[in-house]
Amino acid sequence: LAPVELTWNHGFSPRELNEIRRLVIEHESSIIEAWHEHCGQR
């Protein structure tokens, strides 16, 4: 899950991708915490 990077895109504009990336980075700790709760921490 880290670092945040784009590997492929189909349909999002550069502006939308920038907003998505900003939101993911802003909420990164919450996303990682939810990921560990769902998948188990390794």
Image (cartoon, grey):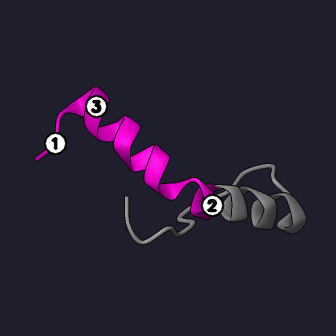
- Give the residue pinned by disc 3: 37
- Amino acid on which the number 3 mark rests in the picture: Glu
* Residue 26 badge: 2
**Closer to the N terminus: mark 2 or mark 3?**
2
Residue range of the region highlighted in magenta in the rendering: 24-42
Q: Which x, y percent locates residue 10?
A: 72, 51
Q: Main secondary structure of the magenta part?
A: helix
Q: Earlier in the sequence, mark 1 or mark 2?
A: 2
Where residue 2 sits: x, y (%)?
38, 66
Q: Is residue 25 above or below residue 12?
A: below
**Mark 1 = which residue?**
41
The reply to whether the C-beta atoms of the residues labelled 2 and 3 are less than 8 Å apart is no
- CB atoms at circles 3 and 1 under 8 Å apart? no
Quadrant of image for the N terminus: bottom left
Marks 2 and 3 sit apart, C-alpha to C-alpha, by 19 Å
Looking at the image, which residue is at 59% across and 64% down?
25
Residue 31 got which mark? none
Q: Secondary structure at mark 3?
A: helix
Quarter holding residue 3: bottom left
Secondary structure beneath dot 2 equals: helix
Residue type at tag 1: Gln
Asked if residue 30 is positioned above or below residue 34 in the image, the reply reads: below
